[in-house]
Image (cartoon, rainbow, N blue to C red):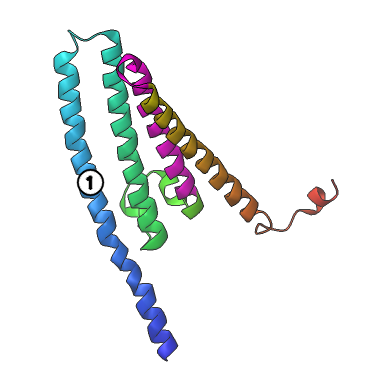
Amino acid sequence: MIERLLEKFLFASRWLLAPFYVALVFGLAGLLLKTFQELAHFVVGAFAASESDIILGVLSLIDLTLTGSLIVIVVFSGYENFVSKIDESVHRDWPDSMSKIDFTGLKLKLFSSIVAISGIQLLKIFMNIRNVSDRDVMWLVGIHLVFVVSGLLMALTDRIGGEGHGAAPKASDAAH
């Protein structure tokens, strides 16, 4: 009986994560405000801007969009994986892929997004290379490489760890 009560308590504790996901939604709203601010700055200065300035403005918008998408992935995937399933039938436009992201897929999507965001930041620095010190460029490239290598190592360890946990090979596969 004590074990059952403890398990119920532990299982119910997953709901403590829900406020974290709500906080991320507020973070997404803050990011939306920043996106509108960046868009207004971009549009107002577009006619006087150089080609590099336009590219930098677009890269900033892409960066904000990727970050917003990352937040949405974390909110929905995290909620579904750790708190409660969302009834897809209630939402006609529910993306099919959203409910198919497991914890491993979530980690890989997170790292992919972080690498993409880091790459965009690095591209923005390269577009403005005259105003950035060599030391800063080396640090940014190093940090980006750490993200890339970390993501690859995580994907590799997930793949290695997943081998042997799958279904038994088919008879036709065993013959080869």
At horizontal 38% and vertical 85% (from top left) the residue drawn is 5
**Percent x, y of residue 130:** 33, 14
Residue in the foreground of this view, choosing between 133 and 62: 133
At horizontal 79% and vertical 48% (from top left) the residue drawn is 173
Residue in the foreground of this view, choosing between 11 and 147: 147
**Percent x, y of residue 7:** 41, 80
Residue 166, located in which quarter of the rendered image?
Answer: bottom right
Residue at the far right: name it: 175
Q: Which residues are magenta?
A: 105-133
At horizontal 36% and vertical 49% (from top left) the residue drawn is 74
Residue 106 in view: yes
The residue carrying pointer 1 sits among few (fewer than 14), some (14 to 19) or many (20 or more) residues within 10 Å by Cα, namely some
At horizontal 17% and vertical 17% (from top left) the residue drawn is 43
Q: Secondary structure at mark 1?
A: helix
Vertical order, 107 against 51 (above or below): below
Tell me which amino acid carries mark 1. Gly
Residue in the foreground of this view, choosing between 20 and 175: 20
**Percent x, y of residue 61:** 28, 27
Left or right placement of residue 148 versus residue 172 in this view: left
Residue in the foreground of this view, choosing between 84 and 68: 68
Q: Specify the quadrant that holds the C terminus.
A: top right
Q: Specify the quadrant that holds the N terminus.
A: bottom left
Q: Main secondary structure of the magenta part?
A: helix
Vertical order, 69 against 121 (above or below): below
Q: Which residue is mark 1?
A: 27
